[in-house]
Amino acid sequence: MSFFKKIINSQLIDVIEWTDSTSNTMVHRYENQGKEIMMGAQLTVRESQVVVFVNEGRIADVFQPGRYELSTQNMPIMTALKSWKYGFKSPFQAEVYFVSTKQFLDRKWGTSNPVMMRDSEFGMIRLRAFGIYAFRVADPVVFLKEVFGTTEMMTVEGVEGQIKRTVVSALSDILAQSKIPALDLAANYDELGQFALNALQPRVAPLGLKLESFVVENISLPQEVEQAMDRRTSMGVVGDLGKYAQFQAAEALRDAASNEGGGAGMGAGLGAGMAMGQILQGTVAAGQQAQPAAPQNQATPCVSCGKPVPPDARFCPSCGKSQQGTPCKNCGEPVEPGAKFCPACGEAQ
């Protein structure tokens, strides 16, 4: 190879490829250093990459993963833009962009300020939340047009702020539309994350992006709501408040009795004892009120005629029959207790 041919070849690009040594590069512009691309040059597009050719500021051909030998046949848009004729073999100038289409994982989001939520039980409350999300470039052409522009390289940090602000601004609507009560938010993080993913997807699609996952790690309720939840939990654990009050008073009385601190201990013990006495008195009174009243004395039917006989009456006021004893099995006349035969008919009893 002659010296002049070496110089010419050194000004031409015959292999185009890019390997990403970082974890956050989204777009990399291939550095040609003023060189021209040879017709027939080898283009290597790896998995999770897409290559976009730009001619004089206009997006031309897009190459998916694979190995290509550049020619007018596989660059139809470039051929049309440059008005190449078939069989064109001369080198050409073009900007080459490698777009990473892999998922960018473990991107964090959070609310710097509380967001408002209308709850059916607590009314208007303020919430703080945080979590993680993952996204990727879904449409490289749209992403280059709307976000990337003409810079040499773009990293995740260039779009992360936009996504975070979109999440925070939409969080109030997401919580309201989910209709999950504040007390049940902690038990529905997965459902809320899926709901948020579906709601946020249309907001990032115009940028050529796609959210792959959205995870809610924690939602912090206001302090007063947490205190109300703690009180309700305590009430559920206690159960019978009356018995719990008795138990508390008994515990206080025991602690006061074991306190050897002198007058203060005696005063506490006396107060606990008085409280215990009042509780016990109230419990006994409540028990007495709860007991059913004893039934009043009622009239009994006559042993002979069956008409009502006043209590403690020895004879029926209607027929005059004695009410002492039980009626005879045969004639119905009263029989004295312990008698073996009826005094009226002689029937054995």
Image: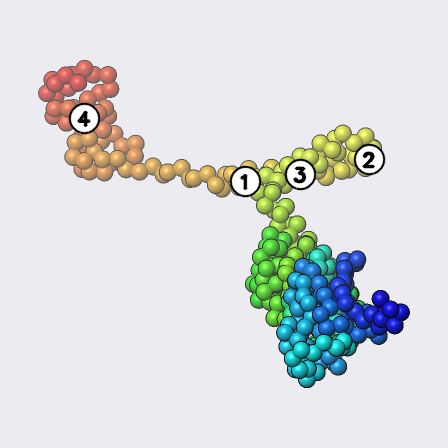
Q: Which quadrant of the view contains residue 189?
A: bottom right
Residue drawn at the location 60% of the way across and 52% of the way down:
187
What residue would you read off at disc 4?
327
Q: Which quadrant of the view contains residue 298?
A: top left
Q: Quadrant of the C terminus?
A: top left
Q: Are dots 1 and 3 in contact, CB under 8 Å?
A: no
Residue 205: in sight, yes or no?
yes
First-in-chain label (1 vs 3): 3
Residue 242 is labelled as: none
Residue drawn at the location 23% of the way across and 38% of the way down:
308
What residue would you read off at disc 2?
263
Q: Which residue type does callout 4 highlight?
A: Pro
Residue drawn at the location 76% of the way across and 59% of the way down:
19
First-in-chain label (1 vs 2): 2
Residue drawn at the location 73% of the way across and 79% of the way down:
55
Q: Which residue type does callout 3 highlight?
A: Gln
Q: Which quadrant of the view contains residue 342?
A: top left
Q: Which residue type does callout 2 highlight?
A: Gly
